[in-house]
């Protein structure tokens, strides 16, 4: 796990284990994963902003550049956690 400014960056395995209250405390979680010493071309993030929770799936173009593939907004972390985990499992 790493911290970068206001983000918590963690492996896919660790992100999948997060509980909604842990995500609420962290505020912004971004995944990363390596396979055969290569960074996977996708990452998923979840972020709480006031009264909305945003989940994004991004494709890495040429690190650190990336593009947004999918985004959904939810009223609570509990409502967002299933999408967050589903998109992690897609990568």
Image: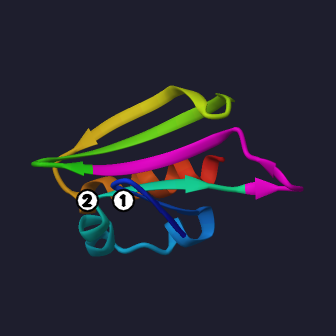
For disc 2, the marked residue is 77
Left or right: where does residue 29 sit relative to residue 23?
A: right
Which residue is drawn at the image coordinates 39% and 33% (left, top)? 71
| Marks 1 and 2, how far apart at CA | 6 Å
**Image location (x, y in percent) of residue 88:** 56, 53
Left or right: where does residue 25 sit relative to residue 57?
A: left
Which residue is drawn at the image coordinates 10% and 48% (left, top)? 51
For disc 1, the marked residue is 81
- Compared to residue 62, the image places residue 31 above or below, namely below
- Compared to residue 57, the image places residue 31 above or below, namely below
Query: Is there CB contact under 8 Å for labels 1 and 2?
Result: yes
**Image location (x, y in percent) of residue 29:** 41, 57
State the scheme by which the image is colored.
rainbow
**Image location (x, y in percent) of residue 55:** 37, 44
Tell me which corner region of the image, top left, top right, bottom left or bottom right, holds residue 62. Answer: top right
Mark 1, other Cα within 10 Å: few <14 / some 14–19 / many ≥20: some
Which residue is drawn at the image coordinates 67% and 34% (left, top)? 63
> How many numbered discs?
2
Left or right: where does residue 39 sit relative to residue 54?
A: right
Pick the front one: 64 or 33:
64
Q: State the extent of the magenta-drawn residues as a range.
A: 34-47
In the rendered image, the residue lying farthest to the front is 5
Mark 2, other Cα within 10 Å: few <14 / some 14–19 / many ≥20: many
Say whether residue 41 is magenta. Answer: yes
Say whether residue 18 is magenta. Answer: no
Left or right: where does residue 77 sit relative to residue 61?
A: left
Query: What's the magenta bit mostly, secondary-structure-wise?
Result: strand
Q: Judging from the image, what secondary structure is the residue with disc 2 in?
A: helix
């Amino acid at each position: 796990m790493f911290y970068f400014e206001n983000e918590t960056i963690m492996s896919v395995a660790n992100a999948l284990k997060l509980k909604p209250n842990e995500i609420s405390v962290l505020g912004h979680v971004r995944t990363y994963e390596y396979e055969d010493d290569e960074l996977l071309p996708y990452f998923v993030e979840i972020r709480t902003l006031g009264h909305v929770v945003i989940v994004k799936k991004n494709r890495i173009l040429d690190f650190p550049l990336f593009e947004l593939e999918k985004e959904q907004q939810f009223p609570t972390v509990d409502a967002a956690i299933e999408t967050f985990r589903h998109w992690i499992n897609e990568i």
